């Protein structure tokens, strides 16, 4: 019976918040979207995350679904845009850490590239262990390029709260690099200026 329901009818029902119609659409297109996304990511886990986010985005924007247009095309467009967003964020993060590494080399913190890679990886790990709000604000500032004021507006918090979280993030990073003053200076110079 479910096979007989066409995409247009599913779109209409999903727009009305029908979870059964959404499940049918999910089961109908999940595998195809996964295959499509893998052609970009070359990584099954990342592709699964993107497809999951695609369906979340569809559900969150269900009121905007145009049932006269192809919901299949809409899903593929969401998947592609999600991939592009993730790719851009990863590219920014990688560029930031590469810049940090180059800065450290220019300042001759160490001629040992392996030791520097260890420091960069340690910094990445420390950032991942930050409290969720600190990490979110740090990412918005350093990887998305948002100013403190923009972050405060986006998260609906005060600029002082943003500053407080950035201070807390630096305090944790400083504690983890307490015996590595030169590297800590580079981190501070690159991380903690608005």
Image (tube, rainbow, N blue to C red):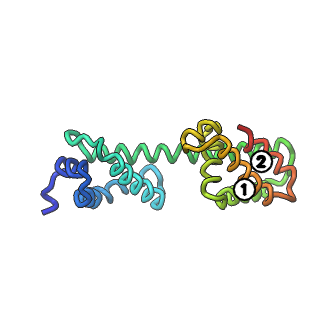
Q: CA distance from mark 2 to mark 1?
A: 9 Å
Above or below for 149 versus 155? above
Graded by Cα atoms within 10 Å as few (under 14), some (14 to 19) or many (20 or more), the crowding at tag 2 reads: many
Residue at the (66%, 58%) spot, across then down: 130
Q: Is residue 76 left or right of residue 175?
A: left
SS at mark 2 in the image:
helix
In this view of the protein, which residue sits in the foreground, 151 or 89?
A: 151
| x and y percentages locating residue 24 in the rendered image | 24, 59
Q: Which sits earlier in the primary sequence, circle 2 or circle 1?
A: 1
Residue drawn at x 65%, y 45% as measured from the top left: 162
Q: How many marks?
A: 2
Whole-percent x and y of residue 154? 54, 41
Q: Disc 1 on helix, strand or loop?
A: helix
Pick the residue in front: 112 or 91.
91
Point out the image quarter for the N terminus. bottom left
* Residue 188, image quadrant: top right
161 relative to 23 in the view: left or right: right
Q: Residue at x 47, y 52 (%)?
A: 41
Q: Name the mark on residue 123.
A: 1
Tell me whether the residue at label 2 lies in contact with that at label 1, contact meaning CB atoms closer than 8 angstroms: yes
Q: Position of residue 110 (x, y in %)?
A: 86, 51
Query: Which residue is denoted by mark 2 in the rendering?
Result: 187
Residue at image coords 83%, 46%: 185
Q: Residues within 10 Å of mark 1 (few under 14, many from 20)?
A: some
Q: Residue 77 has which mark? A: none
């Amino acid at each position: 019976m479910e096979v007989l329901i066409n995409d247009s009818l599913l779109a209409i029902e999903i727009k009305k918040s029908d979870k059964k119609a959404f499940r049918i659409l999910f089961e109908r297109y999940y595998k195809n979207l996964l295959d499509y996304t893998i052609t970009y990511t070359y990584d099954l886990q990342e592709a699964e995350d993107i497809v999951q986010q695609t369906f979340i985005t569809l559900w969150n924007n269900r009121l905007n679904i145009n049932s006269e247009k192809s919901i299949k095309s809409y899903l593929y467009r969401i998947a592609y845009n999600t991939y592009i967003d993730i790719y851009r964020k990863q590219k920014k993060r990688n560029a930031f850490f590469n810049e940090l590494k180059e800065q450290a080399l220019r300042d001759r913190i160490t001629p040992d590239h392996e030791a520097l890679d260890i420091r960069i990886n340690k910094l990445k790990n420390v950032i991942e262990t930050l409290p969720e709000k600190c990490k979110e604000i740090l990412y918005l500032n350093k990887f998305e390029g948002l100013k403190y004021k923009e972050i405060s507006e986006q998260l609906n918090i005060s600029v002082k709260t943003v500053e407080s979280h950035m201070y807390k993030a630096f305090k944790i990073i400083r504690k983890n690099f307490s015996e590595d003053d030169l590297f800590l200076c580079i981190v501070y110079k690159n991380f903690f200026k608005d």
